Amino acid sequence: MSDVARQFRDFFVSLKLTIVLLALSIVLVFVATLDQVNLGIWAVQQKYFHSLFVLWNVGDVPVPVFPGGYLIGGFLLTNLICAQVYRFKLSAKKSGIWLTHVGFITLLVGELITGLWQEEFALRLDEGQTRNYAESYRFNELAISDTTDPNFDDVVVIPEKFVAKGEPIQHPKLPFRVVPKVYYPNAALAQRDASSPTAPVTPATTGIGLQALASPLKMTYKQDERNAPAAYVELIGPEGTVGTWLTSADPRFPPQRFDYGGRSWKIAFRFERNYKPYSLTLLDFSHDRYPGTEIPKNFSSRIKLNTPDGVDDREVLIYMNNPLRYAGLTFYQAGFENDDKTTILQVVRNPSWTMPYIACTLMTLGLIIQFGIHLFAFIGRRRRVAPVAV
Amino acid sequence: MKKFIPLLVLLLGTLYLGSKLLPQRSTSEFNLAGFGDLPVLVNGRMKPMDTVARNSLLLFQGRQSVSTAAGVKTTHNAWLLDVFFNSPVADSYRVFEIVHPDVLALFELKAEDGDGKKRFSYSDLTKKIPELEKQIKLARPIESALRTPFQRAVVQLYGALVQYQQLKHTLSPPTSDDYLAEVLRFQKLIPEGVAAVRAKQANQPHDEAIAKTMIEFGQRYLFMSEVTSYLAIPPPNNVADDTAWVTTGASLLGAFQRGSVDSSVLAYAGLGHAWRLNQPEQFNKIIELYSAQINPRFGERIQKADAEARFNAAEPFYASMTLYVFAFLLAIFSWLKWPEVLGRSAFFLTGLAWIATTAGIAVRMWLEGRPPVTNLYSSALFVGWGSVGLCLLLEAIYKNAVGSVTAGLIGFATLLVAHHLSLAGDTLEMMRAVLDSNFWLATHVVIVTIGYSATYLAGALAMVYIVRGLFTRSLDASTADSINRMVYGILCFATLFSFAGTVLGGIWADQSWGRFWGWDPKENGALIIVLWNALILHARWGGLVKARGLMALAVFGNVVTSWSWFGTNMLGVGLHSYGFTDSGFMALSTFIVSQLAFIALAVVPLSKWRSFSATQTGNAVTPSVPAAPPRAPARS
């Protein structure tokens, strides 16, 4: 083996590297936890854990200042696998270490998969309401629907990030180009008195935008708030402009209708939707409190689950610590609003949800074996020493 | 003769504990204990009056003892009776603690005028309450973590005053001079009064004076029912729902429909009358009759309330604290003289204190019907319990008093922490829906808390090692070696439990919220403990640290654990956020600084360690002495 290769190997199998990586991960987790006060949990995950480097902005230039979760995790994984292959022979005495390390590898891989593919949505249902889609907690979309046919809508959705870019968007299903002119990641809406000569200038030429005005707001990272982006969007047909609309993802802001080219259209900025091949109906939501207080004791949603093909048609009860797992998704009781008449379910897709269970069983078992070996050796030694001491 | 000393110590300790269990002899002719057993439904839980009195005093002034305006020591139950029935007297008790100078200035008070230079009466404060309300309007919209110390003091005091008002409106309107007569008059007036009001509403001829009086009664009782949230009146016998307790005000309002005043309301009115007019015989008779009246229906829960009052009086945790101090001192002295006798005595006392905490925790579990750890307060009790349990085990194996010293240290410290946490209010509060799962509370929470216990224990053992080694000559080679082994063994234990506990938390989160790991501050704190313990173990296995380095790292484990236990809750974000307190933050910071100081001591060059200095070289010390200064602490 060449010198370089040996050095390379020695570096990756060394216990010192393990310790440095453990220390780095402690610092990373600690700082990320503190930063949650500023950024909120979701942004912290992106910045610190689901990244190769933690970036700090110096002026406008992002500078890597610390290894991120993927980098530390990747090195730990390499270190562990190398050490395992190179240093530990598979033997009964080392079985505890083996199990622990294999479990840890599974855990790291599982967390990587989760970081890459986990999705979370909210499903809001009023009592008696039926829905076949859930809404994103964070992402929004611009939806333009052709509503001419009374039997169905033909919808084109444009994810928020394309709206943010501001470049014209041409889609074969639309007879016009979509040109986002102004975009605010979070916006406040205010009344605009169009009849007044002193009314503030607005980019909007039609629709609600004539009576309402959007102004930028600081982005929020709080766990119980979400950003409501707004955009002024111009639609341009072959004969020139159709008009500029104000659109907002604020749930109070309704979709706007217009006619163009002999067809009826609807434009709306809305929470990103995730459609399901089945529908849920909220039959009843109940919320028990401890007597004489507002402390919640229990909340539960009785739901009717339907698939169009009729394969599933049944009632389920979702309550705290008792979610519904269906079609690769899990539905949890997350909250309620509207005087206990609306339930909020959290819908999660996590393809690797079984991996932590496996990993942790392996690791716990491994630790018990490893420390058990130590303990018995210790007891045995004391037994041998004890008679001498007496 | 000397060998009987440990038994004597054990006997004395047992007698001390036994004396705590005896009912306290009351100098009062009033059956205050009987009053303390009466139940009231607060925050969803049936509590004895005794607990209401103690918790309120703790919240107002951070202690349970109370004196009259004249400075005569009295009991918490007597104070509560005055609050319930004798407002003018109650207002003169100096029970509101104010220390922030700006808050004192707000009320135009001087610290010197207060009882103990910090406690003031409600009468002292009344004049400036509008000013306080102005300040509270300014402070309220600000998130608790962002409030200034002044704003926090304002919010705290306001909370205390609100609770005081609630108490005052619990059993009678505080403005009434003769409440019993008032209720009886109301009772008598109901039939014609209701008729008069009905007639008035229907624009029929009616007795205007009676209608007016009746409406005034109604407004008065409506106000009473709106002010308080203490549900003191049990449901009448024809109501099936056992939890349908109501406030006195609401019950009086109900009398308009029922046509008569509820017997419980009358009983309390009579009780108040007897208390105000100083008629102990009548007072005691009413207590007896009223207890007999509610006993058949709420017997089991009243038994619990009674047990809780006795538990409060026995103060098992306070008693343990005292015993831990003595055990600690005896164990320290055993290193100087009579190692066998004093060491054994210390061991016995530690065991006794541990049994008392065990009993205390068991009673709390029975009262709540829950696993041992349900909130921050009970976690402090349990951390101490776990650590001391392990210490007893170590002491049984090694018999060198190290276990007893550490047990005394941790036992005392955790109970002290628990005491300060109890100031926040009821420690037996109901569980919120999301936590309402005995299975997960019994597994995840208990195991992760044992992980805390073990990490602290390793840190405390390391502190003993450092202090003894550096400042005394008493750390001989074999003791050094045994502490080294103890720390290592306990760290293994800590790693296993903090890991398993954290994982179970992840599984609970997966069951409840659909994600195994959410990077919530508390989860991260637990993760850091696991990582830190893993780091120490790897450093030791790799030979990167020897005894002294191990000790330094183990002490830092205390910092890590404290941050995870309390620091994460102070951030004000995430699922385990309990709010920020200045005193809590100060205490945590002080503790962390003290631990860093211990680490600094650990890195003092070995030649300066008295136990290992030149005079003792050549001994068998070598195996536990690191050749080079440890590296890892520098990185931490």
Image (cartoon, coloured by chain):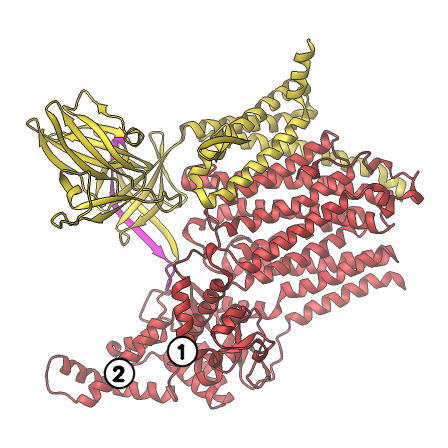
Chain colours: A yellow, B red
Mark 2, other Cα within 10 Å: few <14 / some 14–19 / many ≥20: few
Specify whether residue B468 is in view: yes
SS of the residue under disc 1 = loop
In the image: residue B465, left or right of residue B190 = right
Majority SS type along the magenta span: strand
In the image: residue B473, left or right of residue B135 = right
What is the span of residues highlighted in magenta in the rendered image? A274-294
The image shows residue B456 at horizontal and vertical percentages of 66, 48
Mark 1, other Cα within 10 Å: few <14 / some 14–19 / many ≥20: many
In the image: residue A39, left or right of residue A194 = right
Q: Quadrant of the C terminus of chain B?
A: top right
From the viewer's perspective, is the residue at label 2 or at label 1 nearer? Answer: 2
Specify whether residue B230 is in view: no
- Confirm whether the magenta stretch covers residue A277: yes
Foreground: A269 or A283? A269
Query: Which residue position is annotated with label 2?
Result: B216
Foreground: A2 or B395? A2
Foreground: A326 or A230? A230
Residue at left offset 72%, top offset 29%:
B542
The image shows residue A138 at horizontal and vertical percentages of 34, 37
Callout 1: chain:
B
Amino acid on which disc 1 is placed:
Leu
Find residue A206 and name its label: none
| Residue found farthest to the left | A262
Residue at left offset 47%, top offset 43%:
A36
Query: Which residue position is annotated with label 1?
Result: B171
Foreground: B610 or B434? B610
Callout 2: chain:
B
- Confirm whether the magenta stretch covers residue B610: no
The image shows residue B287 at horizontal and vertical percentages of 47, 81
In the image: residue A80, left or right of residue A266 = right
Q: Quadrant of residue B488?
A: top right
